[in-house]
Image (cartoon, grey):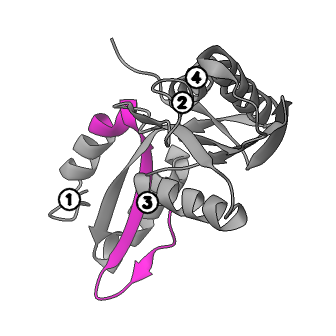
Amino acid sequence: MNKPDTYRCIASPTESLFKDKGSKFHGYAFRVRDEDEVKSCLEQLKKLHPSARHVCYAFRINPLNEYYRANDDGEPSSSAGKPILGQIRSFELQETLVAVVRYFGGTLLGVPGLINAYKTAAQEALSAATIIEATITKPIDLISGYEKMGDVMKFVKDSGFEYETPQMTEKFELRMHIPHSQWEDVYTLCLENNWLQEETS
């Protein structure tokens, strides 16, 4: 069964605030494409909230081969990261990080209370987001002599696929971004026309 070419993600970062028995739970949602972006977002939050007791989070990335993580950051096991991840899945989102920063209010909430608080903070952050559909693509790097540039550009523009600004070096080079379900067909066509670089990532 083929996976779809599109997936759901958020358009821009959002925030939320949930309070329970004096504790404050600041929810944040970000679009992230890899773990480096996850790390960068978490570092920003820790700088923004240096006195917070916990920064719990979960993320899903790589729409084709789902990769996810959930982190309780010192809260009781599965009381924070798991309910946050559950909300990301409930909204059917990919390339999404949700982090919840907790300030302890002096009253213990217990595991059920923590699960509800982290779930609600995550839910409210995602409810505030604009959700968009993005396309799963894979690049193809084209290269040709300048005598074939017109043919290459006609193909690229007629195809309607996204492409990057051509590089004019000793040869004409251009990177296209192909929806993954069509990649093999386009690759074969480009191969037949001798438009491919030796290696395509």
Say what secondary structure mark 2 lies in: strand
Residue 190 in view here: yes
* Kind of residue indicated by mark 1: Asn
| Relative to 120, residue 172 above or below | below
Q: Which residue is mark 2?
A: 6
Q: Residue under circle 3? A: 36
Q: Is residue 87 above or below residue 175?
A: above
4 or 3: mark nearer the eye: 4
Residue found at x 49% / y 41%? 74
Q: Residues within 10 Å of mark 2 (few under 14, many from 20)?
A: some
Q: Nearer the viewer, mark 4 or mark 1?
A: 4
Q: Residues within 10 Å of mark 1 (few under 14, many from 20)?
A: few
Tell whether position 173 is magenta: yes
Residue range (magenta): 164-185
Labels 1 and 3: the sequence-earlier one: 3
Residue 193, x across and y down, in percent = 24, 54
The mark found on residue 194 in the picture is: 1
Q: Nearer the viewer, residue 130 or 54?
A: 54
Would you say the residues marked 4 and 2 are in contact, meaning their CB atoms lie under 8 Å apart?
A: no
Kind of residue at badge 2: Thr
Give the spatial CA distance, label 1 vs label 3.
36 Å
Q: Secondary structure at mark 4?
A: helix
Comes first in the chain, label 4 or label 3: 3
Quadrant of the frame with the C terminus: bottom left
Q: Earlier in the sequence, mark 4 or mark 1?
A: 4
Q: Secondary structure at mark 1?
A: loop
Residue at 79%, 45% (x, y): give it: 15
